[in-house]
Amino acid sequence: TESKYHRHEGNLKTRSTELGSAVTGSSLTTVLPASTTVKKSIVLSSESRKELAKQAKATKEERRAQIDGRHRYLISRLADGIDLSEQQVEEAIISDDKFQLIEQFFAPSGLKKLLFFYQDVLQQNLNASSTSDGSTNSLPQKKLFITMGSTEGFTGTCAFFLRTSDEVITASNISQKVNFGMLDCANGNILQGLEFFLSQIMIPALKSQQNWGAVKEGLKNTQIQEFLYSVDKFVGTLSSSRQNIEDKIQLTKVDVDIYVRNLQNPSDYITAG
């Protein structure tokens, strides 16, 4: 039994030594390339970031060189409406990935509208340390950006430009061919913002309008009066809908006892009804 034990022990030691060598060898050949790959990936990602930053800067300068009187008109309107400096607005526009929409808006028979949102968006905090899962903290910050109006949620201020003609927009005709307006929908209250815009801006402007084109009678024309009545009615519907959503409809409390106290027979019920 003793000889068998020593023989088995020897085999175990031999096998453990061989296994250890195999494991050690495999771990060395695995770990070294992995660490090297990690270092390379870090270097490459750093180089990629620098290259992307370089390309972004070149794109911004190229766009800055394209800015003319038409862009200046848009920038000045946005700066006045949103209470930003023209330099801040310009920087936001040339940094926007939808910059080409401006050119499409200026083109003959181009886009009918050009929308800008100014609201809180989540932006990565570059100075913040990464969390345990590798992600970085994101903080809400005010940002001005171009939008089609169908992809981002609307929670702040919308500045819009509407063209009134299919003609090409030039620096000389942009003030006549393009209208500017704003919707303030703070906290996502779109109905209230639209109600205010129509009731306080559009309806007063329409009712003071003197020139109605081919309609020579102006405000005395029946169709014009019906149109203004429809707009007024629509604003009233918006107000009712908003109040319903906000649960602000309160029914008047009635003292029922006054009506039911002396009800004794069916005829009394009919009279009360």
Image (cartoon, grey):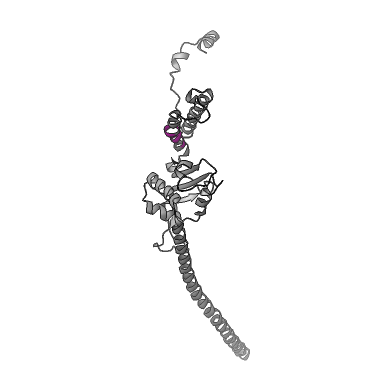
The answer to whether 206 is drawn above or below residue 266 in the figure is below
Determine the residue positioned at 55% across, 47% down: 108
Residue at the limit of the structure toward the front, as seen here: 172
What is the x, y in percent for residue 158?
Answer: 45, 44
The answer to whether 29 is drawn above or below residue 241 in the figure is below
Instruction: Indicate whether residue 196 is drawn in magenta.
Output: yes
Instruction: Indicate whether residue 200 is drawn in magenta.
Output: yes
* Dominant secondary structure, magenta: helix
What is the x, y in percent for residue 236?
Answer: 48, 28
Is residue 73 visible in the rendered image? The answer is yes
Determine the residue positioned at 37% across, 45% down: 80
What is the x, y in percent for residue 130?
Answer: 43, 63
The answer to whether 220 is drawn above or below residue 122 in the figure is above
- From the viewer's side, name the closer residue of 65 and 36: 65
Left/right placement of residue 5 relative to residue 81 reads right
Left/right placement of residue 266 relative to residue 85 reads right
The answer to whether 18 is drawn above or below residue 38 in the figure is below
- From the viewer's side, name the closer residue of 212 and 180: 212
Magenta part of the protein: which range? 194-201
What is the x, y in percent for residue 111?
Answer: 54, 46
- Quadrant containing the N terminus is bottom right
Determine the residue positioned at 41% across, 62% down: 126
Is residue 184 visible in the rendered image? The answer is no
